[in-house]
């Protein structure tokens, strides 16, 4: 199907102003604890984006127009704290660096797919274009957005498609985003190439960075990092682990973000492109960079007509790794089932 047909489907799919339905929640909560907003999840369709609220408070917006890829921005965590960097969606925010402008809050993409760079955002790079909004439902304790998307090269050629399902909810002391992507080799064979530049990523609030960068105006970094294997700090980069957690103090509150790699994912436990400057990305493909193995060893070929599913959980939590019970939280997530599209 041609790209313009998918764009028309997208427009038809988002007709209407407010989408509010009932969805089955995986964990029911009510009331407030430690200023953590809980309650019903509502999803509102706005121009080029979907606004997600919990208990009447903003959680995040799924922005699918105006950029190279869909992103979630902002992401509001415990105590109403913005957990991701504002740049480049907002310029000149005090205390933020202006490096890596392609690292936009929270996203899924990869650096080389069929020899097209979908990670970068410059002339010649590919774009992920929403083709259809399949579902946008809120409920008493859980909300979900489902979309179909096209990965389009700078020449306009569609390389592949995906179906992504994103779930939202609040629990005591935390907010959760479940992000599942099914890659469809709908246009022929698809190769995700061996590069560190990928894949399921978040760029954190500057306070969660492990190091400051005074030349760029970053002076408040106080973050710490640890993975499921007990590796800490900068050393989490390139290591395989079930999860990685970054935490620190923002506005006088200790908060953090953990990313969980589902055990049903290909090549679990994944490698982590997790940096000292606040990038945390699960990358199951970058073996050459992470382990100094021969180039291409991490390539993943998806044959024409086949599909592969990846699932991750983002836990925006109060406290450090221990107080948030990250290891136990991961085990509960690991027991959940991936639903393939």
Image (cartoon, grey):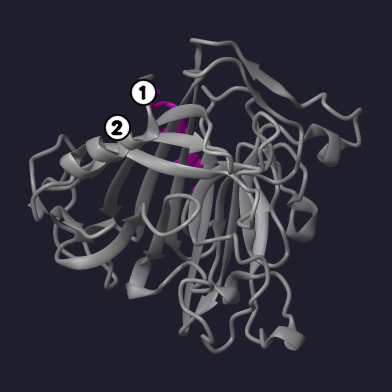
- Asked if the residue at tag 1 contacts the one at tag 2, i.e. Cβ–Cβ closer than 8 Å, the answer is yes
At mark 2, the secondary structure is helix
Point 73% across, 74% down: residue: 211
In this rendering, position of residue 237 left or right of residue 146: right
Please give the residue where the numbered disc 2 appears in the rendered image: 5
In this rendering, position of residue 91 left or right of residue 341: right
332 is within the stretch colored magenta:
yes
* Residue 321 shows in this picture: no
Point 57% across, 65% down: residue: 247
Give the magenta-colored segment's residue range: 326-338
Q: Is residue 337 above or below residue 180?
A: above
Q: Is residue 186 above or below residue 6?
A: above
Report, in whole angstroms, how far the alpha carbon at label 2 lies from the one at label 1: 7 Å
* Residue 64 shows in this picture: yes
Q: Quadrant of the C terminus?
A: top left
Point 88% across, 30% down: residue: 295
Q: Point out which mark residue 1 bears.
A: 1
- The location of residue 309, given as percent across then percent down, is 48, 24
What secondary structure is the magenta-colored segment mainly? helix
199 is within the stretch colored magenta:
no
Q: Nearer the viewer, residue 152 or 327?
A: 152
Q: Quadrant of the N terminus?
A: top left
């Amino acid at each position: 199907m041609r790209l313009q047909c998918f764009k028309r489907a997208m427009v038809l799919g988002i007709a209407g102003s407010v989408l509010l339905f009932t969805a089955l929640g995986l964990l029911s909560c009510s009331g407030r604890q430690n200023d953590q907003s809980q309650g019903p999840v509502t999803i509102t369709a706005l121009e080029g984006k979907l606004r997600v609220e919990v208990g009447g408070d903003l959680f995040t917006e799924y922005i699918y127009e105006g950029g190279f890829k869909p992103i979630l921005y902002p992401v509001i965590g415990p105590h109403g704290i913005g957990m991701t960097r504002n740049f480049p969606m907002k310029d000149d925010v005090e205390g933020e660096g202006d490096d890596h402008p392609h690292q936009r809050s929270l996203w899924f993409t990869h650096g080389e797919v069929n020899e097209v760079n979908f990670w970068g955002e410059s002339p010649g790079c590919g774009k992920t274009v929403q083709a259809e909004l399949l579902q946008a439902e809120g409920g008493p304790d859980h909300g979900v957005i489902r979309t179909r998307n096209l990965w389009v090269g700078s020449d306009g050629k569609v390389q592949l498609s995906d179906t992504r399902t994103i779930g939202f909810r609040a629990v005591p002391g935390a907010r959760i985003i479940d992000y599942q992507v099914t890659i469809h080799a709908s246009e022929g064979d698809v190769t995700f190439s061996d590069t560190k530049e990928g894949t399921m990523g978040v760029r954190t609030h500057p306070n969660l960075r492990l190091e400051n960068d005074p030349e760029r105006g970053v002076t408040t970094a106080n973050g710490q990092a640890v993975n499921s294997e007990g590796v800490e700090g900068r050393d989490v980069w390139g290591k395989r682990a079930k999860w990685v957690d970054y935490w620190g103090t923002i506005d006088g509150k200790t908060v953090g973000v953990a990313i969980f790699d589902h055990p049903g994912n290909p090549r679990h436990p994944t490698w982590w492109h997790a940096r000292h400057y606040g990038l945390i990305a699960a990358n199951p493909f970058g073996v050459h960079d992470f382990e100094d193995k021969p180039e291409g060893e991490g390539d993943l070929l998806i044959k024409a007509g086949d599909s592969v599913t990846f699932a991750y959980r983002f836990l925006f939590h109060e406290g450090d790794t221990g107080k948030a019970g990250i290891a136990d939280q991961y085990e509960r997530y690991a027991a959940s089932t991936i639903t393939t599209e």
